[in-house]
Image (tube, helix red, strand yellow):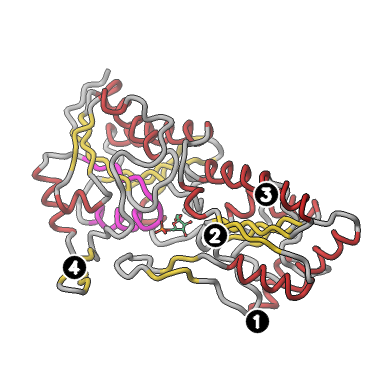
């Protein structure tokens, strides 16, 4: 064991997902076994660092965490230290609390911080790194929309849950000869809809990156009925929109840095499909089900590798980095590089190509390439 006297903070920020606890466990165990480092867990993301709310994480405290969903530390998707919401009277005012966070970090005698989170947490972490906090980031999100990593942990578990749901929806679709629409999360990226749609055998898969053409969706449904397959499964990402139309906003969360919450496109789609085809439609919105439950084996392994690698980076004073998976190997990227960027589905992605070869309707009219169609509808 390479003895290190380091004291390291850890926090989980943004929406929760399966695998967060597995990262915490990997960090604590690796820190203890390989280096003799101490770990301090901040509660509710950056909020805990700003408000000095924390717990000591010793070896025994992480026992049994590998398969547990959520995060034992709690999380927050509104705790941007530079734009921190504080209720004054009936209204939120936004204050820069980043210096308080730095002060607490120093007063606790910490040497480094491991920040587990998505885009929002990484943007905040990049800015905190500029303020002098030695940070290593770990990429999480069910949406899989962080740049620079092949995959984020949480995504696979969400796809597994969505696929199981689509499998179950199939039986009612078949029995009642209906169009069943399954709406999945994913924000502005179509990774969950694409992967679960293809894994679940969806007939129509709609992703935010391709504004869909309603007529070709209805044609696909009619064709299936004409060929004797009198049911259809539509998988739609919450950020999908019709060509010339808008995304459906479920609500605005005023005190959140990312205020828009999407949801409900499936109801709009169901009404339109029923109106045009006369075929009965039903809607299932999976929502937060995709963020819950036990992590898949893939996510447990990925989370364990990320947590271990982040700890090794800290031991080697390799800061200002995000640990990532590149061609199945651990790698790192500059935190500043990933901040504020989004990784969307590309039209030449192998799973998009597979969907086309399978005859899955992606909302693109027959005879047009996806790129040409998207170009045309944007013009
Ligand atoms: O980023 C993860 C995610 O679950 C998105 O897929 C979804 O749009 C959003 O968070 C929901 O946020 P909240 O939990 O605040 O409703």
Residue range of the region highlighted in magenta in the rendering: 112-130
Q: Residues within 10 Å of mark 4 (few under 14, many from 20)?
A: few
Q: Quadrant of residue 369?
A: bottom right
Above-or-below relation of 115 to 23: below
Task: Assess whether mark 4 and mark 3 are in contact (beta carbons under 8 angstroms).
Answer: no
Distance from the alpha carbon under mark 2 to that under mark 3: 23 Å
According to the picture, the residue beneath numbered tag 3 turns out to be 169
Q: Residue furthest front?
A: 176
Check residue 124 for magenta coloring: yes
Q: Which labelled disc corresponds to residue 379?
A: 1
User: What secondary structure is the magenta-colored segment mainly?
Assistant: helix
Distance from mark 1 CB to nearest ligand 1 atom below 8 Å: no
User: Number of numbered discs present?
Assistant: 4
Q: Which quadrant is the N terminus positioned in?
A: top left
Instruction: First in sequence, mark 2 or 3: give its number.
Output: 3
Q: Earlier in the sequence, mark 3 or mark 1?
A: 3
Q: Earlier in the sequence, mark 3 or mark 4?
A: 4
Q: Residue 50's x, y, as percent?
A: 17, 53
- The image shows residue 45 at horizontal and vertical percentages of 27, 49
Residue positioned 18% across, 42% down in the render: 54
For marks 2 and 1, give the CA distance.
Answer: 21 Å
* Badge nearest the viewer, 4 or 2: 4
Element type where label 4 sits in the image: strand
Mark 2 surroundings: few (<14), some (14-19) or many (≥20) residues within 10 A = many
Q: Residue furthest left?
A: 107
Q: Residues within 10 Å of mark 1 (few under 14, many from 20)?
A: few
């Amino acid at each position: 064991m390479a003895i290190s006297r380091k004291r390291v903070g850890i926090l989980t920020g943004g929406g929760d997902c399966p695998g967060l606890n597995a990262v915490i466990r990997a960090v604590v165990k690796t820190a203890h076994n390989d280096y003799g480092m101490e770990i301090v867990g901040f509660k509710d993301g950056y909020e805990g660092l700003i408000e000095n709310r924390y717990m000591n994480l010793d070896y025994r405290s992480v026992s049994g965490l590998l398969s547990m969903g959520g995060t034992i530390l709690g999380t927050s998707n509104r705790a941007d230290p530079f734009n921190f919401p504080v209720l004054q009277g009936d209204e939120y005012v936004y204050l820069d609390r980043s210096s308080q966070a730095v002060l607490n970090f120093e007063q606790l005698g910490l040497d480094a911080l491991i920040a587990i989170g998505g885009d929002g947490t990484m943007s905040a972490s990049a800015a905190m790194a500029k303020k002098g906090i030695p940070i290593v980031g770990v990429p999480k999100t069910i949406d899989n929309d962080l740049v620079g990593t092949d995959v984020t942990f949480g995504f696979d578990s969400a796809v597994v849950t969505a696929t199981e749901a689509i499998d179950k929806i199939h039986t009612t679709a078949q029995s009642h000869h209906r169009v069943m629409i399954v709406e999945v999360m994913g924000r502005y990226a179509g990774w969950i809809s694409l992967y679960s749609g293809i894994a679940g055998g969806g007939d129509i898969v709609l992703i935010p990156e391709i504004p869909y053409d309603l007529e070709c969706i209805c044609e696909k449904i009619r064709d299936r009925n004409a060929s004797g397959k009198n049911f259809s499964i539509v998988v739609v990402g919450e950020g999908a929109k019709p060509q010339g139309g808008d995304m459906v906003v479920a609500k605005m969360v005023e005190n959140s840095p990312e205020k828009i919450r999407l949801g409900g496109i499936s109801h709009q789609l169901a009404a339109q499909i029923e109106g045009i085809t006369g075929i009965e439609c039903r809607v299932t919105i999976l929502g937060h089900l995709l963020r819950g439950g036990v992590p898949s084996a893939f996510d447990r392994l990925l989370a364990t590798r990320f947590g271990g690698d982040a700890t090794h980076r800290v031991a080697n004073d390799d800061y200002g980095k995000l640990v990532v998976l590149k061609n199945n190997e651990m790698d790192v990227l500059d935190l500043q590089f990933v901040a504020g960027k989004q990784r969307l589905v590309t039209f030449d992605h192998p799973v998009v190509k597979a969907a086309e070869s399978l005859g899955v309707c992606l909302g693109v009219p027959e005879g047009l390439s996806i790129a040409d169609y998207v170009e045309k509808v944007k013009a």
